[in-house]
Structures are given as structure tokens and as C-alpha cells.
Amino acid sequence: MFADENDVADNPEQSNQTSAPNEGTGQLSGEIGAGDSGSMLSGRLLCITLVLLFIIHVTVFLFLLFLGPGTRQNDYIYDEASGYYYSSTLGYYYDPATGLFYSAASGQWYKYNEDS
């Protein structure tokens, strides 16, 4: 895998392979690939990466726009048994006549304060 000093001394062509430029091309003879294929590949990968990031960004934006947290804040359904509106995600009842909220967990009524 790695050449010893003796191997390089035995094969003079091998020692010049990576250091001597080809005549007329300006490239090293030991390079892998030809021309600008490496930079073209890098450009393509960069372009593909940017397109994928754009798609992810748009997908997250649309998810937040249509399915984000704002859609779950107003899931109150009228409960005929109690006569109040009930939110299954919050666990609160709402009385539209008084504007108070009732917590089923604590058993207390609350008034919503927009400032806090």
C-alpha cells in the first residue's frame, strides 16, 4: 500500500509520476480524473444540496402555516351534557355566557387575561 524508499529507487518512473507535469496539458500525470470534472461534480452536489434545503424549507413553512400550533388552539366543541364548550387538547370547558374557563383537572374557574 505504501511505497518504501527502495521501491521508489527501483522504479524511477513511479517517483516522477506525481510530480512531473504532462507536456502541453499543465496537469500532473498522477491526477485522478481529467479536466474540471472534480469541480463540476462539486458544483452539482452543491446545487442538489441547495435544492433539497429549499424543498425542506418550503415543507416546514407549509406545515407550520396549515398544521402548526395555531390550529389546535381553537378545538372547542359544544358539550350538550354540560352546556359548555370543551377543548380536548387543553382539558378546559368554556362558558360563553360568563367568559370563564373551567379546568377539569383542578376543578376551578379561570378568567382569561390577554395581558398575561
Image (cartoon, rainbow, N blue to C red):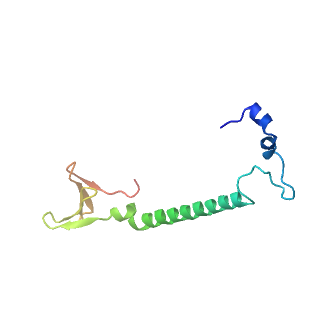
Residue at point 26% right, 59% down? Answer: 100
Image x and y of residue 80, in percent:
14, 67
Image x and y of residue 13, in percent:
80, 44
Q: Residue furthest right?
A: 24
Residue 34 appears in the picture as rendered:
yes
Image x and y of residue 77, in percent:
23, 67
Residue at point 84% right, 51% down? Answer: 21
Residue at point 24% right, 55% down? Answer: 91
Total number of numbered labels? 0
**In the displayed structure, would residue 52 be above or below residue 7?**
below
Near-viewer residue (4 or 24): 4
Near-viewer residue (61 or 21): 21
State which quarter of the image contains the N terminus: top right
**In the displayed structure, would residue 52 be above or below residue 106?**
below
Asked whether, in this view, residue 10 is left or right of residue 108, the answer is right
Asked whether, in this view, residue 68 is left or right of residue 91, the answer is right
Q: Residue furthest left?
A: 81
Residue at point 71% right, 56% down? Answer: 33
Near-viewer residue (27 or 47): 27
Quarter where residue 3 is shown: top right
Residue 18 appears in the picture as rendered:
no
